């Protein structure tokens, strides 16, 4: 791996942050540079180095502004990428890099701070780190159009989640998972998102398609089922929108803090 300079590292860090962070840093560099140069005495040595110090701080300010512009462009690109998705075919036509950006943007719209690790490549390890809602989540993306994701990849993610002390792990694919993979994740802090699941996730966060808004029926309909996520009671509800509109299901009574659901047919 090629070594990078301190300036390159700084630029790379700033461009991954929200654009306004770069603007704030640019202002800080400019103010500090102004404060330092105006506070210097007028002896020969300081007169000689004053232009260099001013140049250095102004250069850092410009670097931060450029990083802010790049961050804004990347953010706009990710938003457009997600908003133009129309279903499974468009999802499966994405490159692996676009796939990671799409998944990151989807979770970003759910209120998470998303760190793109950049270490995954087309078939690498953890690609995203989500922070928010009181948890740290590791996400691995597999842009496999037709291929099934097997239990080996699920075990690998579970090992990383355990080693890093993360709250849970999410494995996302545009394909599907084998039965062994589905069985392995039971009772573990893992979520498997297959192609149809990702299509629904994307649809739920697109502006034109707001998330399903479950409506609680009478309070007397509270079920004895325990929420699979938090253990609270569940209530019978009806989906208002989407492919399952009009269908009933049990939803956690702590919604929207908890989004646990069970099919209405479960006893």
Image (cartoon, rainbow, N blue to C red):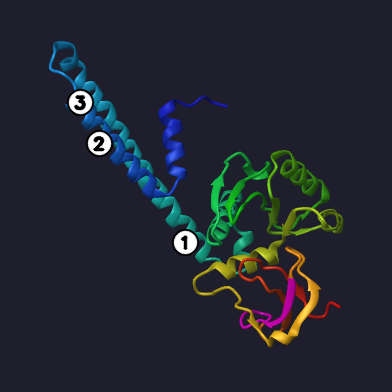
Q: In the image, which disc is placed on residue 31?
A: 2
Q: Secondary structure at mark 3?
A: helix
**Residue at 82% over, 56% down:** 187
Q: Nearer the viewer, residue 38 or 247?
A: 38
Rendered location of residue 89, percent (x, y)? 63, 65
Q: What whole-number distance in Å separates the C-alpha atoms at marks 3 and 1?
A: 44 Å
Q: Secondary structure at mark 2?
A: helix
Which numbered disc, 2 or 1, marks the residue that appears first in the sequence?
Answer: 2
Q: Is residue 86 visible?
A: no
Image depth: mark 2 or mark 1 in front: 2
Q: Characterize the local packing of mark 1: few (<14), some (14-19) or many (20 or more) Cα atoms within 10 angstroms.
A: few
Q: Is residue 17 left or right of residue 217?
A: left
Rendered location of residue 197, percent (x, y)? 69, 65
Q: Characterize the local packing of mark 2: few (<14), some (14-19) or many (20 or more) Cα atoms within 10 angstroms.
A: some
Query: Which residue, given by chain and number where applicable, does mark 1 sit on?
Result: 80
Q: Secondary structure at mark 1?
A: helix
Q: Is residue 143 left or right of residue 69?
A: right
Rendered location of residue 118, percent (x, y)? 57, 41
Q: Is residue 59 above or below residue 142?
A: above
Where's the N terminus, which quadrant? Answer: top right
Which numbered disc, 3 or 1, marks the residue that appears first in the sequence?
Answer: 3
| Magenta segment boundaries in residue numbering | 233-244
Query: Which residue, given by chain and number where applicable, does mark 3 sit on?
Result: 37
Q: Is residue 45 above or below residue 149?
A: above
Q: Residue furthest top?
A: 44
**Residue at 73% over, 38% down:** 163
Rendered location of residue 122, percent (x, y)? 64, 44
Dividing the picture into quadrants, the one containing residue 53 is top left
Where's the C terminus, which quadrant? Answer: bottom right
Q: How many marks?
A: 3
């Amino acid at each position: 791996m090629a070594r990078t300079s301190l300036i390159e590292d700084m630029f790379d860090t700033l461009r991954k942050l929200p654009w306004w962070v770069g603007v704030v840093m640019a202002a800080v560099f400019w103010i500090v540079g102004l404060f330092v140069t105006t506070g210097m005495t007028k002896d020969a040595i300081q007169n000689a180095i004053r232009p260099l110090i001013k140049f250095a701080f102004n250069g850092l300010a410009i670097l931060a502004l450029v990083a802010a512009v790049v961050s804004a462009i990347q953010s706009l690109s990710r938003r457009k990428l997600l908003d133009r998705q129309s279903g499974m075919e468009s999802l499966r036509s994405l490159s692996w890099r676009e796939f990671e950006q799409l998944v990151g943007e989807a979770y970003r719209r759910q209120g998470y701070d998303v760190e793109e690790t950049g270490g995954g490549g087309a078939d690498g390890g953890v690609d995203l780190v989500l922070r928010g809602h009181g948890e740290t989540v590791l996400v691995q993306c597999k842009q496999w159009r037709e291929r099934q994701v097997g239990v080996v990849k699920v075990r690998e993610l579970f090992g990383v989640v355990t080693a890093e002390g993360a709250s849970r792990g999410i494995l996302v694919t545009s394909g599907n998972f084998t039965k062994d993979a589905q069985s392995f994740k039971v009772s573990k802090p893992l979520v498997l998102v297959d192609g149809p699941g990702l299509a629904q996730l994307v649809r739920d966060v697109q502006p034109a398609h707001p998330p399903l808004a479950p409506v609680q029926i009478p309070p007397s309909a509270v079920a004895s089922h325990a929420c699979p996520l938090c253990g609270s009671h569940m209530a019978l509800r009806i989906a208002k929108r989407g492919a399952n509109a009009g269908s009933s299901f049990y939803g956690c009574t702590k919604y929207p803090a908890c989004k646990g659901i069970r099919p209405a047919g479960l006893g």
